[in-house]
Amino acid sequence: MIDTTKTRGKEEEKKERTDEDETKDDEDEAKMMTIKEVVRDACEEGGYALRRRNSSLGVNECTTTETTKGGEGGRGEGSSYGVYDDGNDERRKRRRRLVVRSVVGGTDSHPLDVVLRNQI
Amino acid sequence: MEEQILILSTSSSEIKFDVDDFLRRLVHEVKEYARPPTSNFHVGAACLTNRGNIFLGVNVEVEKCALNRSVHAEQCMITNAMVGIRNAELEEYRRKEKMKGGKKTKEEREKERRKEHERNNNNNNESNEEEEKEKIVKIAITHAPCGHCRQFMNELRDAKDIQILLPGMAAMRLEELLPKAFGPLDLEVPGDEEHREERIKRRKSEGSDAIVVDEEKVHVRTLLLDGCPPNPRDRDGLGTMEKFCKLLREALEDGRIRFGQFSFGNLEEEERIFAAMEELAHTMAHSYAPYTDSPCAIAIPLEYQRSLEERWKTGDKRSGMRFYFGASVECAAYNPSMTPMHAMQVALHCTPFRPSSYKKSSPEYGHIGTRPLFWSQRRCPISIYVFGFRDAKISYAETLKKEFEDIARRNDTDYAPQFIVKEILFDRHMFSVEDPQDVIVREYERIRSMFVEVLDWYSL
């Protein structure tokens, strides 16, 4: 007599494993897509930097996430220094804001907002 | 060891990354932006600082030019980090100035200056009290770094503890990649004569040829902005440039410098000159040249296409103009050093203001490596502004002109721009004494007159 429970068990395990693999693959793909986007923004519009928003001003001031005004490369700080008019308005519009938070030691202690900065 | 997680979130989703994993993945994407027309070998690098900033780098080669013209991804990344950190310091400085608020009289400034001077004197030997400066803690690279880059990275603050992440390998410290390294502490740092005897004594007692330096007693500058804003001991005179910026700003505020005072009244033009001058001085103050005592910074103006929105807003359809900056970055082993020209290559490759057809996602991506570094289409000479010290051991002015022209000629066969070098030299401690004679106003006028032509050419 064939023990079907055993076969079923194996099949189920196999299926579970495949599902797990698929989920992992999906996660992996999502990660890669996100990274691609981050890199594209940084390298094409951000002067090769993913910069913590207002990092020099201290962590507590980094909490804004969905900001769309100014941006560091725009009229904001650039013009306060009086140097550059930039041509970034259009880019800013289509840029999707990404928020990066770094969790150190298990606490959400460093909320980061990646503002892709025109630094040069 | 503390766990480090990085969360990337958009409005619709949130993805968690292990920091090391994130950096390792990141560099594989970044390498696509490399510019290797000669080697066709793409390298990407990324570093994370203790304040959570991430800076990227790629290898930048120049077609038909000798291999010593190429910049490695690690060097590119460090240059970007320097610029990023320098700008953050500038931001902080401006913010503080803004908070102080209001215009001050000359007398009030004098008082403040005296207080600051006293404070500096008291704190000269108490550098530990300073808050921790920004430094690189992790570096990820797509390939094992070459010996040249290991040596270059050894200049960074707390270099031996930096974690290096390479594909398929566990994280390792730079010290493991570069054991028994020759580094900044092995050299007699120019200007540190006061410790020479002590070093010689120790060297003899240990029977070694190496120059031993007591790290605790000797303040050795490391890459990434040690000592700027002014290093209390200011061996290389970089405080002069910081002071130059400060005095310039003060003279503007109290009306000793007025836009339109020296020219035909184009205020926008004067404002641009002032800002470029200030930025160039700041760039020089953050150059890293402890071994040759020859800090140097350069700036070149290039045009960029205004966006549609900007054109609509300003009603100006012509292209705009921006200054690009580069500074020297030296290495204890000399050869892996970067000249201001190398730094300029990085600036021009990494700026978001380069024409859109140069970017990876453009249909012309295939040509990214063969696009000219200098994209100016104006039929006029391009000025290179050079800031340096009169008594520097190295003068870059002449070599710069040749290098720029060489690159431009090989870059674009249709149009090779001519370059004119405008060298502006300073005395090393010229602003260390008070400024009763309004030296700053005379300096401003001297430098301004050298900047004017370029703006005429670009007819802003």
Image (cartoon, coloured by chain):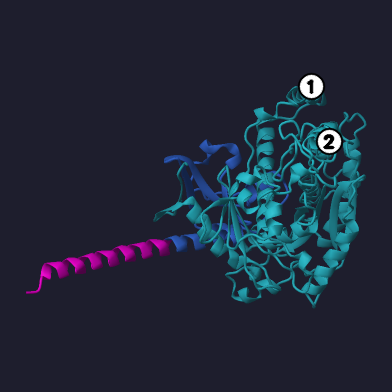
Precedes in sequence: disc 2 or disc 1? 1
Q: Which residues are magenta?
A: A1-30
* Chain letter corresponding to the colour blue: A
The extreme left residue here reads A1
Return the x and y of residue B233 as percentages of the image width and height: 80, 32
Q: From the viewer's side, name the closer residue of B219 and B87.
A: B219
Q: Are marks 2 and 1 on the same chain?
A: yes
The residue wearing badge 1 is B111
Residue at x 71%, y 32% (from the top left corner):
B216
**Which image quadrant is residue B39 in?**
bottom right
Residue B367 included in the magenta stretch of the image: no
Kindly report which numbered mark, 2 or 1, lies closer to the viewer in this rendering.
Answer: 2
Return the x and y of residue B409 as percentages of the image width and height: 82, 72
Q: Secondary structure at mark 1?
A: helix
* Distance from the alpha carbon under mark 2 to that under mark 1: 43 Å
Q: Tell me what hue chain B is rendered in.
A: cyan
Return the x and y of residue B48 as percentages of the image width and height: 57, 49
Disc 1 residue crowd, few under 14, some 14–19, many 20+, Cα 10 Å:
few
The residue wearing badge 2 is B200
Residue B65 in the figure: left or right of residue A108: right
Q: From the viewer's side, name the closer residue of B41 and B31.
A: B41
Q: From the viewer's side, name the closer residue of B28 and A96.
A: B28
